[in-house]
Amino acid sequence: MIERYQTDALSRILSQEYKFEIWLDVERVVAEVQEAEGIIPKGLSRRLKNVKVSTKRVEQIEETTNHDVIAFLEAAREKIGKEGRWLHFGLTSYDLVDTASAVILLQATAVILRDVRRLIKGLNRLRNKYRNCPQMGRTHGVFAQPITFGYKAASWHEEAERNYSRLLAAKREMSYGKLSGAVGTYTILAPRIERLVMKRLGLKPEPVSTQVLPRDRFAALAAACALYACGLDRIATEIRNLSRSEIGELAEPFTRGQKGSSAMPHKRNPITCERVCGLAKVIKAYMVCAFDNVNLWHERDLTNSSAERVVFPDMLHLVHYITLKMIWVIENLQVFPDRMLEHIEASNGVYASQRLMNGLIEKGMDRAAAYRAVQKASFSAVRTRTNLKAVAQADRQIMKYLAPAELDEIFDIGWFLRHVRTGRK
């Protein structure tokens, strides 16, 4: 991942140096269990506690071996001495790689989940603060009926909660490791060893593995990340739309000294939300690659390996990055209630067209006739920039069925918001 989109919290967890630390941890735990079970002599696990492997040295050895795990093991054995012959005893490469990958992905996901909760709290505050703030609802980009801005924020909040649950479920899906050997049949080490090691690592043994953990687990994490990114994309897109010059109901934060354009000093662009939308595309694209990795030849091939070295570090960095950016936007979002009321006024009362039609039907007018009458009146209101209520009052066909007081009630905004303001059901 390029430095621009890395986050401090994940930079270490997803680094090559940390990966080798976790590889050493896994090998140490395996050695502890094997020593306790009498499979190898005591000594290796103690030595491994003080071993550090240089990424540079691993890279040097890999130039010859063309195998990163073997290069890592040789670099570790250089630091261990005679006990090094028992390092990695009975294991195949992906017993180590996949088990360590699960540990790393769980740690990274835990960081993301922590900050998703912070975002959810920010959305909930927005929802409650603007619960009673009227706003024009729009469908197809066109004025529809009144909502409240809190209701819109509530929709964002509920989706974020669902995405949090999906990420949590994906984290549980990833909580598996394996020590089942070259084709997953425990040729060298018995299942008991796997159970003991996984318990110490905070993982569960994979019920049926091949040489690798099943890649649908990894795909589930990618899918949860992609859906979550879609949710942030939706919020960011709505903020961008409501920040447009002709709407102006919201604005993302604008910091001291920030500039919007090299050519036009007046510009105040929603660049953070645009960045979130752009990076969401990248996250969704990575999901396709993770899904393709589910299908490997026989008990495994190597087509997943190269892709995963890019996909998961980059994807998790991006997910965390856009989370932090959206937290900043939501916690500092500028909301303009007066502008929202202006748009309700600018609708010329057409928000009440459905209720007006229903009122005529209730008073005995044929539905098709009521629809035609209200449609004609609504189009006239928009064309002449006259409030629909005034147009209706001048329409003899409509007023034949409705009293003036009934017409006043039909256009009462409070009626449209009577259930919205109560919050959750």
Image (tube, grey):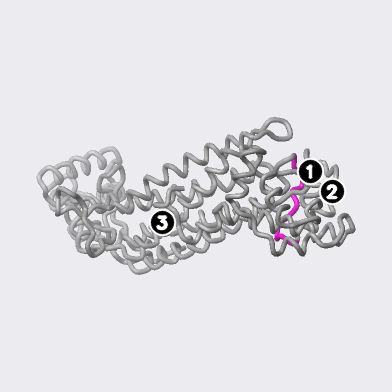
**What residue sits right under mark 3 in the picture?**
156
Q: Outermost residue, top direction?
A: 297
Q: Given contact means CB atoms under 8 Å apart, are the residues at marks 1 and 2 in contact?
A: yes
- Give the amino acid at mark 2: Leu
The residue sitting at 58% across, 38% down in the picture is: 306
Q: CA distance from mark 3 to mark 1?
A: 46 Å
Give coordinates of residue 9: x percent, y percent: 49, 61
State the SS at label 3: helix
Left or right placement of residue 353 versus residue 216 in this view: left
**What residue sits right under mark 1 in the picture?**
181
The segment highlighted magenta reads 200-210
State the SS at label 1: loop
Q: How many marks?
A: 3
> Is residue 336 rendered magenta in the image?
no
Residue mark closest to the camera, 3 vs 1 = 1
**What residue sits right under mark 2 in the picture?**
189
Q: Quadrant location of residue 375?
A: top left
- Give the amino acid at mark 1: Gly
